[in-house]
């Protein structure tokens, strides 16, 4: 779907492999009867995507920020969160973590606690309640998020059932994006949104939100394992103090990173779960052939 300057939209087909477009792209197109063809795609400022053994899946391009939406329920996977953050860091896109469903009491408190290491390592983490029957803090939370979204292009990303489409419908009511209850039995949403869509929030077209399907697996096969420490802020802050310049921080003596692994929950510590995520990812990405 291509939108022209006057706001009209039409279906356009890519001319060839070079004109394969993703949401957020600027393209050159030609009309053909009621549809059209994409002739070329302009150079991208950034491209947010994931990659596993089989395929590359693009989310969107030319982004100002990625909003990683999590919720008190379904329970989120810290591994998937870590992967989404690493992917954003690799593209130089600013991530913002938002924890939705603050109305869910103890479930929310537990999830909020699990996000403490992410606050400590410098990420912005905001609470949110998108449910209409308002929880006490939610008006304030909406205002805060509103100011973060203003004037920016934001990709809304996260597992199924966290409320991505509910959030989009709040800021862009004309979006009429479908939403669906989650399945408690499966601790998961129902994969209601199946394609990535761009929505303007304001008539002046300065603020945009991109809705996306919930993801289960977030492949990082495009990332070389030796880049990982630099893409994880809690590890990154201790780089440059290892005995060996090419230290992998896995087993080397005199490693300045391993020294800081502990669960003291201070800003300079590397939490054990995070370090485990690092070693597992390092292993996984070392199996991939990079060329
Ligand atoms: N309790 C509570 N429920 C919420 C809140 N926000 C959204 N929901 C509910 O969560 C369910 C899932 O919301 P959706 O917006 O469909 O979730 P999604 O992230 O778009 O899911 P997919 O499209 O499957 O990826 C719906 O039943 C929403 O009404 C909230 O703040 N509190
Ligand atoms: Mg959805
Ligand atoms: Zn080291």
Image (spheres, rainbow, N blue to C red):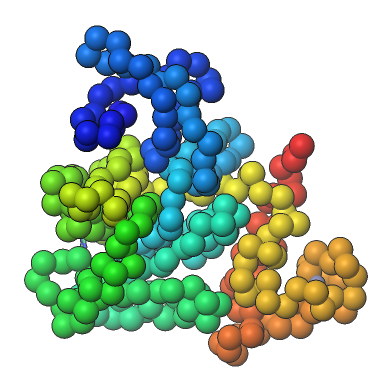
Residue 71 visible in this rendered orientation of the protein:
no
Q: State the image coordinates of residue 119 (x, y, percent, origin top left).
A: 48, 78
**Is 230 placed left or right of 49 in the picture?**
right
Q: State the image coordinates of residue 253 (x, y, percent, origin top left).
A: 89, 76
**The C terminus is located in which quarter?**
top right
In which quarter of the view is residue 1 placed?
A: top left
Q: State the image coordinates of residue 54 (x, y, percent, origin top left).
A: 58, 33
Q: State the image coordinates of residue 17 (x, y, percent, origin top left).
A: 53, 20
- Residue nearest the observer in this picture, 131 or 155: 155
Question: Compared to 113, does 188 lie above or below?
Answer: above
Question: Compared to 78, does 172 lie above or below?
Answer: above
User: Which residue is painted at 80% across and 64% down in the image?
Assistant: 248
- Residue nearest the observer in this picture, 163 or 94: 94
User: Which residue is painted at 31% across and 29% down in the image?
Assistant: 2
Question: Compared to 212, does 239 lie above or below?
Answer: below
Query: How many badges with numbers are in the image?
Result: 0
Question: Compared to 248, does 144 lie above or below?
Answer: below
**Is 164 placed left or right of 153 in the picture?**
left
In which quarter of the view is residue 51 placed?
A: top right
Q: Residue furthest left?
A: 133
User: Which residue is painted at 71% across and 50% down in the image?
Assistant: 224
User: Which residue is painted at 36% across and 64% down in the image?
Assistant: 70
Residue 274 visible in this rendered orientation of the protein:
yes
Q: Residue furthest top?
A: 33
In which quarter of the view is residue 229 placed?
A: bottom right
């Amino acid at each position: 779907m291509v939108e022209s300057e006057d706001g009209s939209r039409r279906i356009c087909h890519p001319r060839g492999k070079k004109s394969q477009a993703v949401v957020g792209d600027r393209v050159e197109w030609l009309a053909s009867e009621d549809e059209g063809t994409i002739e070329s795609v302009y150079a991208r400022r950034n491209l947010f995507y994931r990659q596993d053994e089989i395929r590359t899946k693009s989310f969107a391009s030319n982004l100002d920020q990625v909003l990683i939406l999590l919720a008190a329920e379904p329970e989120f996977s810290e591994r998937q969160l870590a992967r989404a953050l690493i992917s954003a860091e690799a593209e130089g896109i600013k991530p913002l973590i938002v924890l939705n469903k603050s109305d869910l009491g103890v479930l929310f408190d537990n999830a909020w606690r699990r996000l403490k290491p992410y606050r400590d390592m410098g990420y912005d983490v905001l609470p949110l309640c998108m449910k209409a029957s308002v929880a006490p803090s939610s008006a304030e939370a909406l205002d805060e998020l509103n100011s973060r979204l203003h004037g920016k292009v934001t990709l809304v990303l996260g597992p199924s059932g966290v409320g991505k489409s509910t959030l989009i419908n709040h800021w862009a009511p004309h979006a009429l994006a479908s939403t669906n209850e989650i399945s408690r039995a499966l601790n998961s949403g129902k994969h209601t949104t199946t394609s990535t869509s761009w929505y303007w929030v304001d008539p002046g077209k300065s603020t945009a939100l991109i809705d996306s399907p919930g993801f289960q697996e977030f492949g990082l096969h495009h990332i070389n394992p030796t880049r990982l420490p630099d893409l994880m802020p809690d590890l990154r802050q201790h780089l440059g103090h290892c005995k060996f310049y090419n230290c992998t921080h896995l087993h080397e003596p005199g490693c300045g990173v391993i020294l800081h692994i502990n669960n003291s929950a201070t800003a300079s510590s590397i939490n054990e779960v995070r370090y485990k995520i690092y070693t597992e990812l390092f292993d996984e990405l070392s199996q991939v052939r990079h060329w």
